[in-house]
Image (cartoon, rainbow, N blue to C red):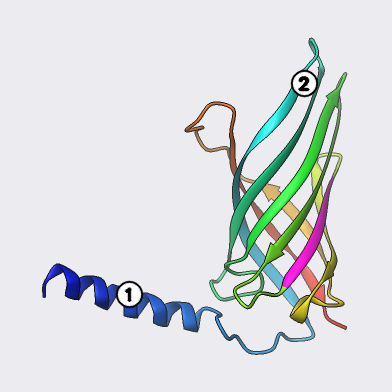
């Protein structure tokens, strides 16, 4: 098979996989669990004010992949704005994110740092996410090497529960 034939076969197989994994997925159960990995990149705007004092704001964009593939929040794209500060040993962080899924349905989520833990809350949504109540935990993953100075590149693992109206 020539290179073009191989590429076409890969495209057809890939397209079938996307269909099986959630394009045109069935209606969501009224309640359940979610489990996914989110990865993103962006650039911070930072303040370094001597030892023990720093702050930053940032905008990041990223994608999600559910575990197993095809689950809730699989193949979403998102954008977040956030801020964090470290003020003489006290750390605070908050992030607000908007996401869109392959069907075009959207959701707005809020994340806050509470001690050493990150907490996730679904705020509002459209389509299948309208009226969804979702909450859970966020576990940061080890950092990746930075390919461009001054950028953020990271992933986290999110697990939790949801209920639909």
Q: At 87% across and 77% down in the image, what residue appears?
A: 131
The circle on residue 78 is none
Packing grade of label 1 (10 A; few <14, some 14-19, many >=20) is few
**Residue 43 belongs to magenta span:** no
Closest to the observer, 38 or 125: 125
Q: Position of residue 54 (x, y in %)?
A: 79, 21
Closest to the observer, 106 or 95: 106
Helix, strand or loop: magenta stretch = strand
User: Which SS class for mark 1?
Assistant: helix
* Residue found farthest to the left: 1
Q: Position of residue 25 (x, y in %)?
A: 60, 85
Q: At 58% across and 33% down in the image, what residue appears?
A: 151
Reading the image, the residue beneath label 2 is: 47
In the rendered view, does 107 fall on the left or right side of 9? right
Q: Which residues are magenta?
A: 106-112
User: Which SS class for mark 2?
Assistant: strand
Q: At 33% across and 80% down in the image, what residue appears?
A: 12
**Residue 108 belongs to magenta span:** yes
Reading the image, the residue beneath label 1 is: 11
In the rendered view, does 144 fall on the left or right side of 3? right
């Amino acid at each position: 098979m020539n290179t073009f034939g191989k590429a076409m076969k890969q495209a057809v197989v890939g397209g079938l996989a996307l269909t099986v994994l959630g394009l045109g997925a069935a209606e969501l159960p009224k309640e359940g669990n979610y489990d996914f990995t989110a990865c993103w990149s962006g650039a911070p705007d930072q303040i370094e004010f001597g030892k023990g004092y720093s702050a930053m704001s940032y905008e990041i964009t990223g994608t999600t992949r559910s575990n197993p593939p095809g689950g809730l929040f699989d193949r979403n794209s998102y954008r977040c704005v956030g801020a964090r500060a470290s003020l003489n040993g006290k750390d605070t962080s908050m992030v607000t994110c908007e996401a869109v899924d392959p069907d075009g349905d959207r959701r707005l989520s809020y994340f806050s740092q509470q001690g050493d833990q990150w907490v996730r809350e679904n705020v509002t949504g459209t389509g299948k996410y309208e009226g969804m109540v979702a909450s859970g935990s966020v576990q940061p993953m080890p950092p990746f090497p930075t390919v461009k100075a001054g950028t953020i590149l990271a992933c986290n693992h999110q697990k939790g529960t949801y209920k639909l109206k």
